Amino acid sequence: MRVWQRKCVRRLPAILAAVAAWVLTGCGTMSDEPRSGEGAPMSSVRVAFTDGFEGDTVVIRVDGREVTQHGPITTRSDVSPPLAWSADIPLERDVVALEVAVPTKGATGSIRVNVKEFPQVNVSFSGGRVELRSSRLIPSIG
């Protein structure tokens, strides 16, 4: 084995650890989201699904564009406040129209929100309706 090969073999664990850390942190600038420049997310909104969900699929749209679909979700009453699921949605603007559809219940709700002022939107299902409420606080679970 040549000298340079021995050096590489000795450094292999450190190289693998660095690559693993890079992968676990989102691979640097190789993610699907732009990191800087035009079109880069400037802010985000947390969408928290609270009461009334039982095995449901949910669809989140921002300004009419679908950004995520998730399911099934079920409200957990063993945590306080009750929670079924939450998602942090990156945004390119601070004021957006947020729409949540629950196809499994045939219901949709929407809200226009300034995420700099209200960084969270709480979503619940009650009385056959999807209710969205903006919130200044992002509560912790537990």
Image (cartoon, helix red, strand yellow):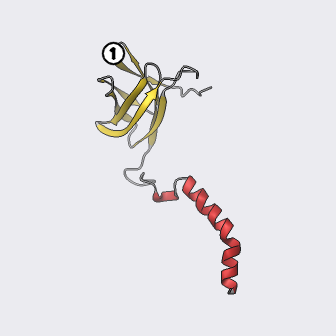
Is 25 situated left or right of 51 in this image? right
Residue 67 placement (x, y as % from top left): 36, 40
Residue drawn at point x = 52 percent, y = 58 percent? 28
Residue 71 occupies which quadrant of the picture? top left
Residue 24 placement (x, y as % from top left): 57, 53
Q: Nearer the viewer, residue 83 or 71?
A: 71
Q: Single out the residue that lies furthest toward the top.
A: 127
Q: Which of 9 and 14 is in front in this view?
A: 9
Q: Nearer the viewer, residue 138 or 25?
A: 25
Residue 100 placement (x, y as % from top left): 35, 29
Question: From the image, which quarter does the C terminus lie in?
Answer: top right
Q: How many marks?
A: 1
Is 46 situated left or right of 13 in this image? left
Q: Which residue is identified by label 1?
A: 128
Is 64 situated left or right of 46 in this image? left
Is 4 situated left or right of 31 in this image? right
Residue drawn at point x = 62 percent, y = 64 percent? 16
Q: Nearer the viewer, residue 56 or 33?
A: 56
Residue drawn at point x = 42 percent, y = 26 percent? 55
Neighbourhood count class around disc 1 (C-alpha, 10 Å): few under 14, some 14–19, many 20 upward: few
Question: Amino acid type of disc 1?
Answer: Gly
Does the rendering let one see residue 119?
no
Does the rendering let one see residue 45?
yes
